[in-house]
Image (spheres, grey):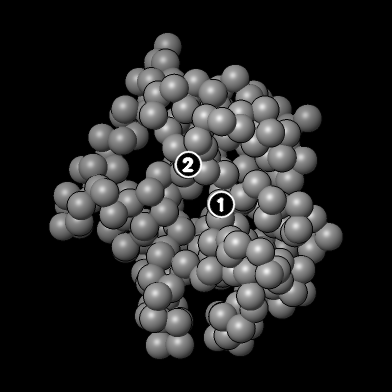
């Protein structure tokens, strides 16, 4: 059986290979290890292996882990659908929120305190339940984020649809990002690529990968 360290090294090697094939430097790419459902001890082990960026998708779990591991210098990325009534609490520990997808959430995140990095999530499917703003609503939402204190727009986030090849889907995100950069020139980041499609994401310009099981191993059953 491979260890956590083996799997981390193997994924890091594949990321470096894909970056080289894309003519990019691996340092341009931030790997966020998604640790949802995994025990806090595993996150501590990742930190000991040099991981700095971790991702969670449920507020209560993220908040508890962030509190337990405060002092390890981890940056917590919130990658799941976020209810507006939990937005303020997530701000308190998150370095970045990858799932900004509607105006009511932007309002809930409004703050005069230090800015939190955020990504506008785009929905690449026709199913609203998958999360993310539909492409035709993208510019108004981006303008809303730009006009709201306490939010620093970094770029776009997307999850590849289940029923089509990942690479053309990621290429669509890259085109949407070019559209967004006309009104938000600094919003150049692209949060895309998971365990099964991070290579395709890197080839299409991903700057932030969100990788879970390829590094952590299978997730324990959702409790
Ligand atoms: C769980 C999750 C990931 C990681 O998925 P893996 O397939 O385990 O790599 C990435 N992004 C989001 C939004 C997730 O919920």
Residue 219 picture location, percent across and down: 61, 29
Residue 162 picture location, percent across and down: 54, 55
* Res. 119 image quadrant: bottom right
Judged from this view, the residue extending furthest toward the front is 113
The answer to which of 61 and 138 lies nearer the viewer is 61
- Kind of element beneath mark 1: strand
Residue 144 picture location, percent across and down: 63, 83
Vertical position of residue 79 compared to residue 108: above or below: above
Question: In the picture, which quadrant includes the C terminus?
Answer: top right
Q: Which residue is mark 1?
A: 95
Task: Tell me whether circle 2 and circle 1 mark residues in contact (CB < 8 Å).
Answer: yes
**Residue sitting at x 43%, y 73%:** 187
Q: Is mark 1 within 8 Å of ligand 1?
A: no
The answer to which of 203 and 65 lies nearer the viewer is 65
**Residue sitting at x 23%, y 42%:** 16
Residue 53: image tag? 2
Q: Earlier in the sequence, mark 2 or mark 1?
A: 2
Relative to 162, is 181 on the left or the right?
left
Within-10-Å neighbours for mark 1: few <14, some 14–19, many 20+ = some
Q: CA distance from mark 2 to mark 1?
A: 9 Å
Q: Is mark 2 within 8 Å of ligand 1?
A: no
Relative to 33, is 171 on the left or the right?
left
Within-10-Å neighbours for mark 2: few <14, some 14–19, many 20+ = many
Judged from this view, the residue extending furthest toward the top is 1
Residue 62 picture location, percent across and down: 68, 40
């Amino acid at each position: 059986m491979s260890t956590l360290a083996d799997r981390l090294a193997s994924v890091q090697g594949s990321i470096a290979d894909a970056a080289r094939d894309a003519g990019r430097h691996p340092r341009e790419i931030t790997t966020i290890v998604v640790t949802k459902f995994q025990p806090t001890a595993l996150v501590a082990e990742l930190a000991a292996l040099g991981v700095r960026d971790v991702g969670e998708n449920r507020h209560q779990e993220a908040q508890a882990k962030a509190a337990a591991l405060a002092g390890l210098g981890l940056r917590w990325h919130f990658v799941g659908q976020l209810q507006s009534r939990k937005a303020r609490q997530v701000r308190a520990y998150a370095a970045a929120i990858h799932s900004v997808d509607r105006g009511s959430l932007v309002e809930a995140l409004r703050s005069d305190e230090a800015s939190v990095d955020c990504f506008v999530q785009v929905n690449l499917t026709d199913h609203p339940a998958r999360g993310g703003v539909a492409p035709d609503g993208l510019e108004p939402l981006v303008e809303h984020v730009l006009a709201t204190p306490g939010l620093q727009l970094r770029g776009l986030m997307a999850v590849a649809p289940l029923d089509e090849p990942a690479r053309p889907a990621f290429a669509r995100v890259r085109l949407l990002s070019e559209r967004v950069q006309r009104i938000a020139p600094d919003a150049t980041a692209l949060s895309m690529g998971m365990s099964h499609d991070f290579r395709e994401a890197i080839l299409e310009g991903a700057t932030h990968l969100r990788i879970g099981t390829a590094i952590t191993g299978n997730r324990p059953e959702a409790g």
